[in-house]
Amino acid sequence: MESKQAMPEQFDNLDQVVDRIIERVGNDIVLGLPLGLGKSCTIANALFQRASSNPELKLTILTALTLESPATTNLLAKRFLEPIADNIFGRYPGLDYTKAARAGKLPDNIQVREFFLSPGKWLNVPSAQQNYISVNYSHAIDALIAAGMNVITQIVAEDANNKHDKPLSLSCNPDITVDLLNRRKQLPAPLLMVGEVHSKLPYMVGDAARENHDFDILFRPEDNGFELFKIPLEPVFLRDHAIGMQVAALVEDGGTLQIGIGAIGDAICFNLNRRHQHPHDFQRALRALQPQPMPLESSLERFDKGLYACTEMLVDGLLSLLETGVLKREVDGFAIHAGFFVGSPTFHQQLNNLPVHLRHKIGMMPVSYTNTLSGQEQKKRRARTKARFVNSTMMMTLQGAAVSDGLDDGRVVSGVGGQHDFIQQAHQLPDARAILTLPATRTKGSEVRSNIVWSYGHTTIPRHLRDVVVTEYGIADLRHQTDEEVIKRMLAITDSRFQDELLAQAKAAGKIDKEYQLPKSQRHNTPHRLEQALRGFSKQLPKFPLGSTFTPTEQTIAAALAYLSPRASSKKVLLKLVWQGFSHKADDTTIAVLERLQLQQPKTMAERFYRRLVIGLLATENF
């Protein structure tokens, strides 16, 4: 039962909430907003507007991963998204400060600082780049306290039917707030906790469950709150599946799993399910992909003991693993411990439709619990057996350093987040491995570039923490190896179009024997070889393996746009696709796509161009 402590003040009028916050903390507001989904857009926007109209009010916003509906510029993307935008992005109101920052019009009395940026979206916004805070996720709490944060406002779920011991839940974002609440009395300055009760937010258990007295103010909007933001699942292409299959073979039964968001994460979870439900098919595909013995001990059988997930982010794939019984090894009654979530429309449907007994197997916890061994260290060590901490990176150097969050000119792409936390944890646990995944190449316009480079002017994970790296072409076990051996193993998983140049650079630096030559077996790392190896399994490797709220036609469009996006800056590529569109006849699938994009009967030059572009694009093999 809840102890007899002060109950929060309750309001249903937004202006009164803002007035009360100012009365409590004064004219210098240092506002903490949770990473991702948990931001109270309503209260944050009201505070922003109040400060915008009152220069005597100073507002500093401390946050991470501000979510935005995508801005579309080309005709194809607009016609694809407009009919379904409300269902995907849920009429999400957004944050007013993002609009002002993008326009370069933040008032002088308002500053926004983030410790994780929405990937790639703030590269050319000076205020975002200048006010970025570089910090590990597990250390972010100290940065917030040091900045003098005096208000937190976030959305919370309410136990409306009195089915739980505690009336409120931080739901999607206990990540930092739990530790702030627990340390509240020791903080150097008072901290005002403001919750917005959100009717569409699921009540989650674990440390996310809170008492009323944890809050000073509760806002209950009369309209039941704004729509929650949803992130569409990315299409999973063949090389993503190739990476996913290999990682799935490195996960031991009875072990521990951490995984992140994105196409590769989806591919890993899908292939873990295939290994569990269809082990023979999984093994056949893996042998076709990698006929040589794997460089690390592999596990290819069903999960009899099951896995336990300890992850900062609860993603779509983990819910699917929970439902299929892959995630069934429990720690303190939970099969999953996670720090936050923001998901796709499918994710929200799954979470809301989970039977109560399964949802209660998910414990939402602070990142101090998931990302570190500190606090109950011996208990955590016993629980996190055979851990596989899997994260994505943008580039790797040939000597094993990872480039995950920034560019060599100093600009920040995203942030380190919890990647360093989990890699460090892997080195602290006796049977754990840190696995970094990346496609071997990337495309920009008509140019293909290697994601494995000799050196780069920015590092996220230093080479002395190198462990396991996986591309579509193989697995490199780097831990405890000499620099020369690391270079050999990285070359073995590099696209063959770039192997000679990289080997020459290593020889010029004296880091590898000048007589060394790559074995012939490693000289066939090409997209064509990958396609040939997995051609017979294409129907088993769908582009949306975790499901989708898109129709089949919309799934085709989404995959086509994802394929086109990095190539669209090249006139040469576009003209080649258009020319291809003249030489191919539209099949039934293509006709359905053209009708959905309103291009079956083009009326303008632009529509005729895009019609031929779409036909050519869909005729491209393995787009």
Image (tube, rainbow, N blue to C red):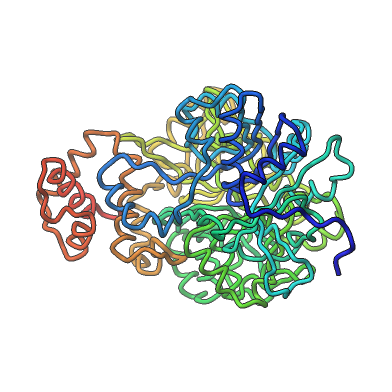
Q: In the picture, residue 358 is in which quadrant?
A: bottom right
Q: Residue 414 in the image: state x and y as whole percent.
A: 55, 37
> Percent x, y for residue 356?
65, 76
From this viewpoint, is residue 418 visible? no
Task: Tell me residue 141's x, y (percent).
Answer: 75, 40
Q: Residue at x 61, y 75 (%)?
A: 325
Q: Is residue 504 above or below residue 379?
A: above
Query: Foreground: 322 or 110?
Result: 110
Quadrant for the N terminus, please. Answer: bottom right
Residue 132 at what x, y percent from top left? 61, 30
Residue at 56%, 41% (x, y): give it: 45
Q: What residue is shown at x 72% (from left), y 50% (from top)?
A: 426
- Observer-nearest residue: 211 or 427? 211
Q: Is residue 443 left or right of residue 97?
A: left
**Count of numbered circles on the image:** 0
Judging depth in this view, the residue of 358 and 432 nearest the camera is 358
Answer left or right for 346 relative to 252.
left
On the question of residue 556 being in view, the answer is yes
Residue at image position (16%, 53%) is 599
